Image (tube, rainbow, N blue to C red):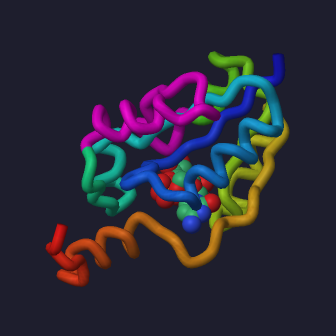
Amino acid sequence: MKRVITYGTFDVLHYGHVNLLRRAKALGDYLIVALSSDEFNKLKNKKSYYTFEQRKSIIEACRYVDLVIPEENWEQKIDDIKKYFVDVFVMGDDWKGKFDFLKDYCEVVYLKRTPDVSSTMTKEYLSSGNISNEF
Ligand code: C2G
């Protein structure tokens, strides 16, 4: 069984995230998502709309995801790779090169980021009042 891992906040899940998760899963048989905790998001200067538990319940519902673990710091990746017998580490290519040190432990793959979509864009659009409230 080929085991793949990826890391992220995955707030307000969108098709860019799903594109990443689908391609990551296609690189193996089992996909682990290390989901950034609310505390770690603070370290990343990210304020997610959904809490960790809410984001976890959403991403666990994704057909490509087999296990969700917490991402609590920048330093846990090597331990995670060993603990979960990971074969492939995957990130979007906005992180290209940043995790090459993991090549000593597993394959490192950077996948093309989906253009023109982000949690921030979605949140900004929804809070901009563009939504007509006729139902
Ligand atoms: N992503 C993507 N296309 C987008 C948006 C995001 O491919 N339009 C990818 C990112 O490259 C990342 C994953 O989806 O691989 C999750 O994105 P974020 O939730 O923004 O994750 P990030 O804050 O970059 O956290 O230790 C690593 C960090 O936790 C990564």
Q: Residue at x 80, y 49 (%)?
A: 109
- Locate residue 30, reporting x and y percent: 71, 24
User: With respect to residue 33, does 118 lie above or below?
Assistant: below
Q: Which residues are magenta?
A: 51-76
- Locate residue 41, reporting x and y percent: 34, 51
Q: Is residue 126 left or right of residue 4?
A: left
Of residues 30 and 8, the one drawn nearer to the viewer in this rendering: 30
Q: Give the number of callouts.
A: 0
**Quadrant in the picture for the N terminus:** top right
Residue 3 occupies which quadrant of the picture? top right
Q: Is residue 20 left or right of residue 71?
A: right
User: With respect to residue 126, does 32 lie above or below?
Assistant: above
Q: Residue at x 75, y 57 (%)?
A: 111
Of residues 121 and 47, the one drawn nearer to the viewer in this rendering: 121
Q: Quadrant of ligand 1?
A: bottom right
Q: Residue at x 37, y 70 (%)?
A: 122
Q: Is residue 129 left or right of residue 114?
A: left
Extreme residue in the front direction = 135
User: With respect to residue 81, does 88 lie above or below?
Assistant: below
Q: Residue at x 66, y 58 (%)?
A: 92
Q: Is residue 32 magenta?
A: no
User: With respect to residue 119, does 35 lie above or below?
Assistant: above
- Locate residue 45, reporting x and y percent: 33, 62
Of residues 71 and 127, the one drawn nearer to the viewer in this rendering: 127
Residue 87 occupies which quadrant of the picture? top right
Residue 12 occupies which quadrant of the picture? bottom left
**Quadrant in the picture for the C terminus:** bottom left
